């Protein structure tokens, strides 16, 4: 096996794995994923792994349960085949929203998913814009937490909005918005928001003067699309000249694209941390350069 890095493509985003391998000049191994008659996931890695510095590309996007299980099975198979080190490249890490027990009887899903990957043989994890930076503490293994700013900022600059203003849809995303606003020299606004129940967001108040501004709602993910739609409505009511949206992870549960389409947004962009939906009116920002650069740095140590 080559002394350099080796990329293994999972079934979640093989195109991204191929792009990363090409940029790194690394061999790309396939791992066909099938199912037994009863529905159990079956994997088999094609290629020699003895002594390999292996990088498994597998965002845990929908169907999240299957993607996570497949990632664990690939890691276990690679470890048994003699891989010297296994790094999971998980640009979108699912199970990141239930990381604390708010009520009795609830699990800490993020911590459980982390333990599963560690038990399967993953030595290190690379993630992009975790839902909460505090999630790094859920992992017993080293975590490389990449920020999407490097990919997002060129796209924002290319939009050349006349009077740009960066908007965080909630307090949790304020640091991300502050970084981008600072880099662009643009003002910042934030929305005060309540969430009556899971996956339902209600924007309440715009904090900041958005009158006459070209507002860009910046978020880590769009799941139901409700947060962005509610934010857009609140911003227009507060006098925004135009409203656009930029989010890192296009989780996009059923109905989300329709909700975003009805929100009367200008430009809408996301990254390809998960496979972008076909025929959607989304500008897609490639993150392979960011992940390939991280892989190259890690492989050198």
Image (cartoon, rainbow, N blue to C red):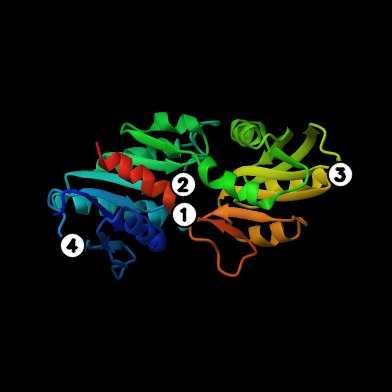
Return the residue at label 4.
Answer: 47
* Residues under numbered marks 2 and 4 in contact, where contact means CB atoms less than 8 Å apart: no
Q: Which residue is mark 2?
A: 94
Residue corresponding to mark 1: 61
Q: Is residue 69 left or right of residue 83?
A: right
Q: Where is mark 3, residue-wise?
A: 237
Q: CA distance from mark 3 to mark 4?
A: 58 Å
Q: Is residue 142 above or below residue 25?
A: above
**Contact (Cβ within 8 Å) of mark 2 with mark 1:** yes
Give the x, y percent position of residue 248: 55, 47
Q: Which residue is at 30% across, 40% downward?
A: 298
Q: Are marks 3 and 1 in contact (CB under 8 Å)?
A: no
Residue ID at (38%, 51%): 68
Question: If you read the primary sequence from the N terminus, does the residue marked by circle 3 or circle 1 appear first?
Answer: 1
Q: Earlier in the sequence, mark 2 or mark 1?
A: 1
Tell me the mark number nearer the camera, choosing from 3 and 1: 3
Q: Earlier in the sequence, mark 2 or mark 4?
A: 4
Q: Is residue 250 visible?
A: no
Q: Secondary structure at mark 4?
A: loop
Instruction: Indicate which label's residue lies in the foreground, 2 or 3.
Output: 3
Image coordinates for residue 211, horizontal then vertical, percent: 86, 39
Q: Gap between marks 1 and 4, in whole Å? A: 26 Å
Name the image quarter holding residue 175: top right
Alpha-carbon span between mark 2 and mark 3: 33 Å
Q: Residues within 10 Å of mark 3 (few under 14, many from 20)?
A: few
State the residue at coordinates (43%, 36%).
145
In this view, 289 is above or below 211: below
> Quick one: label 2 or label 3, which is nearer the N terminus?
2
């Amino acid at each position: 096996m080559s002394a350099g890095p080796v990329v293994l493509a999972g079934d979640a985003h093989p195109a991204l794995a191929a792009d990363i391998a090409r940029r790194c000049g690394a061999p790309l191994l396939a791992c066909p994923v099938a199912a037994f008659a009863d529905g159990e996931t079956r994997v088999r890695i094609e290629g020699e792994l003895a002594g390999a510095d292996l990088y498994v590309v597998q965002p845990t996007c929908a169907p999240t349960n299957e993607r996570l299980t497949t990632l664990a099975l690939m890691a276990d198979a690679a470890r048994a085949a003699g891989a010297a080190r296994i790094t999971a490249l998980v640009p979108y890490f699912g199970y990141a929203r239930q990381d604390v027990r708010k009520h009795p009887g609830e699990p800490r899903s993020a911590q459980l998913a982390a333990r599963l990957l560690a038990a399967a043989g993953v030595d290190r994890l690379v993630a992009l814009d975790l839902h909460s930076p505090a999630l790094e503490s859920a992992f017993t293994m080293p975590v490389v937490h990449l920020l999407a700013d490097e990919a997002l900022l060129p796209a924002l600059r290319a939009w050349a909005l006349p009077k740009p203003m960066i908007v965080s849809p909630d307090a949790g995303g304020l640091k991300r918005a502050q970084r981008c606003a600072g880099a662009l020299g643009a003002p910042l606004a934030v929305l005060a928001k309540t969430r009556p129940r899971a996956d339902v967001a209600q924007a309440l108040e715009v904090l900041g003067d958005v009158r006459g501004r070209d507002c860009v709602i910046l978020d880590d993910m769009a799941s139901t699309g409700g947060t962005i739609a509610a934010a857009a409505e609140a911003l227009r009511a507060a006098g925004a000249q135009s409203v656009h949206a930029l989010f890192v992870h296009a989780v996009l549960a059923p109905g989300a694209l329709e909700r975003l389409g009805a929100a009367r947004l200008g430009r809408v962009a996301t990254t390809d941390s998960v496979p972008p939906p076909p025929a959607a009116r989304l500008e897609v920002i490639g993150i392979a350069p960011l992940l390939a650069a991280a892989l190259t740095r890690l492989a050198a140590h």
